[in-house]
Image (cartoon, rainbow, N blue to C red):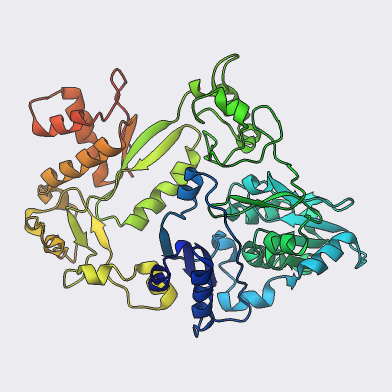
Amino acid sequence: MQALCEQLQLRGRVRVAADGINVTLGGTMDHLNQHIAAVRAHPLLGSKATDFKLAPSAGPLSSQALRESGFDSLSVTLCKEVVTMGSSTAKIPPDKLPDVTARHVAPSEFHALLHGDAPTDKPTVLLDARNMYETRIGHFEVPGVPLLDPKLRCFSDLPSWIDSNEAALRDKRVLMYCTGGVRCERASAYLRSKGEAFRDVVQLQGGIQRYLEAFPDGGYFRGKNFVFDERVSVGSSSEDVVGQCLVCQASCDDYGPRLRCHHCRLLVLVCATCREQGDDNTGYTCELCVASRPAVAAARAPAAGSSPAAQPRRLRILCLHGFRQTGSSFKGRTAALAKKLRDIAELVAGGLCRTNCQHSQGEGQSPTKAQLEPHDDMAARILKLPRTAQPRHAWLVSPDELRPADSGNTEAQWVPAPTTADEQQHLRQTAGWARSVEHLQAVLRGQGPFDGVLGFSQGAGVAAMLIALQQQQQRKEQVLGTVQGTSFLPAKRKSPNIGAF
């Protein structure tokens, strides 16, 4: 897939998973049609059910939109799910999804159901399976048909919303929709898995995009359809504006500036007039944070007459990985903590110290670059490939486990780890500090300053060393000079606490 996209000079995102493939690409129309033909001819991907959507683009809405949508580069990712819904639908095997997902209805039939052309003894409700920043600027509005908007930060929050709102969905005819139809596959399967009282569900085939193609005047859809490419949104000929400025509530649906909530990073709408009153978006608080965290919102609200930019910022905490951690395990260990602290702190991963690496215990030979690059553990599970050793990283190792750096051959630094570990091994881990300092220097210089440091396992020891060096003010020491030269901590602040996990 990547080779094909590169050959056709396409840019955008491709997600490949066991339950399907999701492609959002940009390029010339001729190259896009060549890509479609190649996918259709593929023995695994060439399903007749695949919905290929093509649309013209007048160019990126803004430079930020181009960058954040990923349309300035190409990304082909192997993942667990085409759209991340979490463990809620993990019990449904990918090959069983077509049997449990809701019936697809064409835009014309969906419109007829909204119009009431197919009478039923059940009440009808609309369920929008998109995120709040999408529903803000466009949604269906039908007299007499309630719209259920879960107001999600991310799609993976939908299962818990369904669990909490079963009464609003039980024994109803549920008309579900999303942008292009992909998310409804998972969402409808989860809803229908709850039992007979939740089986009457249909999903809009091709999503809002196909509906607007069938009804150029918008039909029952009001506003704009948020899209995940450089265009950001697409409207109908009606030019309705249903979004509102977060600050003054004036009509607004322009996500071009890409402003975000200071607490949770959700996209927010701010009109041009209100943007001119502040230099940046550090003070904006989205509707969800205001509703769920009133105390935080009140504490962070700007004083009368002050600019939103004057609000306090979140703390920036440098996180240092533990001994023999992989990139995925380190991210997993900090995910829950980052979510809990998102109102007051930003956890910044300090990178993986690749200068002191060992592969997993028990392997007989050092992994090569060719072995490591093709696939990781997730790829092995999805594609049923033999697993290769994942690199595990350390700040200090035993001298006999560290080879001299070889700029011409990075594989020369790989040394097999012992097959066993003992409780005294930390006493022998004395080599590699110089390389670790070089790595920290780059991180601190490139991403600092920070308000604190959080270390995991061996990383906690590194954090303690950094704080000790700072407190001692030993400017003549090379390591101290490295740390101070990159402004690890702002002046006149108390030394941060250190957490070890």
In the image, is 322 to the left or to the right of 85? left
Q: Quadrant of residue 373?
A: bottom left
Q: Position of residue 322 (x, y in %)?
A: 27, 49
Figure quadrant of the N terminus:
bottom left
In the image, is 210 to the left or to the right of 437? right
Q: Quadrant of residue 89?
A: bottom right
Q: Residue at x 64, y 48 (%)?
A: 134
Q: Position of residue 427 (x, y in %)?
A: 12, 47
Q: Position of residue 207 (x, y in %)?
A: 69, 63
Of residues 337 and 409, the one drawn nearer to the viewer in this rendering = 409
Considering only vertical position in the picture, is 41 above or below 400?
A: below
Of residues 350 and 472, the one drawn nearer to the viewer in this rendering = 350
Of residues 162 and 235, the one drawn nearer to the viewer in this rendering = 235
Q: Residue at x 71, y 35 (%)?
A: 251
Considering only vertical position in the picture, is 347 above or below 467?
A: below
In the image, is 69 to the left or to the right of 292? left
